[in-house]
Image (spheres, grey):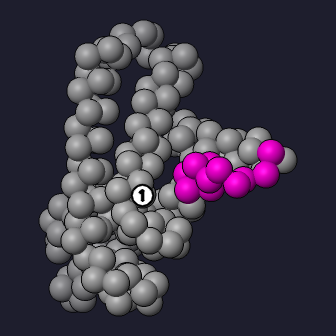
């Protein structure tokens, strides 16, 4: 019975990535290694973010139950590196805009899935008791895929030279929402 639950959690988490890769046309462009390069860029950006956070933002030792608004806002600002990393991945790929967006988003989201959810799903979902948090973690990975596709699209739109001036402000607001999503959700 537990193997059945593990299979469901694993399928809910990983099959949408596979289906998106196959149905988006990336497999026709032989974009697998481009997605792997985007994933490697994700790992490099996350390493740089961790080093930056550890160097410049030490842990806050305020009172219990007190929220450090400014400190958390500054920590969330470090997520601007994700936008720069996505832009770097898209600028290194030649081709149509849709191809650039999907390669960057698929590589970025898959690397995030493997690095943050693979081990908890593998170890926890195979346990003796079933827990709904693994189903929720699988759904969160699907939401993350959609988020990274949208974020890559907004980064691509922001870098366009032919973007009308009237769209510049809404695209900038959407970029800010992408960066501060975790901060706003808290």
The quadrant of the image that shows the N terminus is bottom left
Residue 62 is left or right of residue 123, and the answer is right
Which residue has dot 1 on it?
90
Q: Quadrant of the rendered structure where residue 172 is? A: top right
Measured from the top left, where is residue 82 in percent x and y? 41, 44
Along the line of sight, which residue is nearer the eye, 182 or 98? Answer: 98
Along the line of sight, which residue is nearer the eye, 124 or 174? Answer: 174
Establish if 184 lies above or below 103: above
Q: Callout 1: few (<14), some (14-19), or many (20+) C-alpha neighbours within 10 Å?
A: many
- Is 33 within the magenta? no
Q: Quadrant of the rendered structure where residue 27 is? A: bottom left
- Determine the residue located farthest toward the right in the rendered image: 166
What is the span of residues highlighted in magenta in the rendered image? 155-165
- Determine the residue located farthest toward the top in the rendered image: 62
Residue plotted at (35% across, 16% down):
57
The quadrant of the image that shows the C terminus is top right
Label 1: which secondary element = helix
Q: Quadrant of the rendered structure where residue 36 is? A: bottom left
């Amino acid at each position: 019975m537990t193997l059945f639950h593990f299979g469901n959690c694993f399928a809910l988490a990983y099959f949408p990535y596979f289906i998106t890769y196959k149905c988006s046309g990336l497999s026709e462009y032989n974009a697998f290694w481009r997605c792997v390069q985007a994933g490697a860029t994700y790992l490099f950006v996350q390493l740089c973010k961790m080093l930056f956070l550890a160097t410049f933002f030490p842990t806050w030792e305020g009172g219990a139950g007190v929220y450090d608004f400014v400190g958390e806002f500054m920590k969330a600002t470090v997520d601007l590196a994700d936008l720069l990393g996505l832009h770097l991945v898209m600028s290194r790929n030649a081709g149509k805009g849709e191809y650039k967006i999907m390669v960057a988003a698929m590589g970025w989201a898959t690397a995030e899935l493997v690095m943050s959810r693979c081990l908890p799903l593998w170890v926890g979902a195979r346990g003796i008791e079933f827990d709904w948090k693994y189903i929720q973690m699988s759904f969160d990975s699907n939401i993350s895929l959609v988020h990274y596709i949208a974020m890559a699209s907004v980064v691509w739109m922001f870098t366009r030279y032919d973007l009308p001036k009237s769209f510049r402000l809404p695209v900038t607001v959407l970029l800010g929402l992408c960066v501060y999503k975790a901060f706003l959700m808290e």
